[in-house]
């Protein structure tokens, strides 16, 4: 699992440019996931999902739409996927990492 995440990080890094050169129409990386990627209250939790840290390392728009405890089905049934479909624009990327809660 870690090696797959590391590969993804290096792959994303190869397409990134310095923040100062990003135009206002910079594509967005949308994160769709469960607790492994979600934000947690930094004051109340010593843990964070990996999505919390991505903006610190990458110079692109990163929007974390991860929600703790979600499965593929609940993400769709709760309207989160439909909401996202109304927000993405051409050249955006959606990174989906679900499955931990699907069993």
Image (cartoon, rainbow, N blue to C red):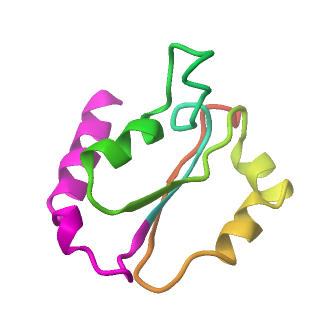
Q: Is residue 34 magenta?
A: no
Q: Farthest residue in the bottom direction?
A: 90
> Which quadrant holds residue 42?
top right
For residue 57, above or below residue 69: below
Is 2 positioned to the left or the right of 36 in the image?
Answer: left
> Which quadrant holds residue 19?
bottom left
Q: Nearer the viewer, residue 41 or 79?
A: 41
Identity of the residue drawn at 75% across and 58% down = 80
Is 92 positioned to the left or the right of 78 in the image?
Answer: left
> Which quadrant holds residue 39?
top right
Identity of the residue drawn at 51% across and 13% down = 46
Is 61 positioned to the left or the right of 101 in the image?
Answer: left
Identity of the residue drawn at 71% across and 63% down = 81
Position in image of residue 68 (x %, y %): 68, 34
Position in image of residue 66 (x %, y %): 61, 45
For residue 14, above or below residue 7: below
Q: Nearer the viewer, residue 22 or 58?
A: 22
For residue 44, above or below residue 59: above
Q: Is residue 17 magenta?
A: yes
Position in image of residue 63 (x %, y %): 51, 57
Identity of the residue drawn at 18% across and 48% down = 10
For residue 31, above or below residue 24: above
Q: Where's the N terminus, which quadrant?
A: top left
Span colored in magenta: 1-28
Position in image of residue 34 (x %, y %): 62, 38
């Amino acid at each position: 699992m870690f090696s797959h995440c590391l590969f993804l990080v290096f792959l994303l890094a190869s397409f990134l440019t310095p923040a100062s050169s990003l135009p206002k129409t910079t594509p967005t990386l949308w994160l769709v996931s469960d607790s492994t990627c979600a934000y947690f209250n930094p004051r109340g939790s010593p843990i964070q999902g990996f999505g919390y840290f991505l903006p610190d390392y990458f110079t692109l728009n990163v929007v974390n739409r991860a929600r703790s405890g979600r499965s593929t089905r609940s993400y769709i049934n709760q309207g989160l996927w439909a909401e996202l479909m109304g927000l993405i624009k051409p050249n955006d990327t959606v990174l989906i990492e679900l499955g931990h809660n699907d069993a």
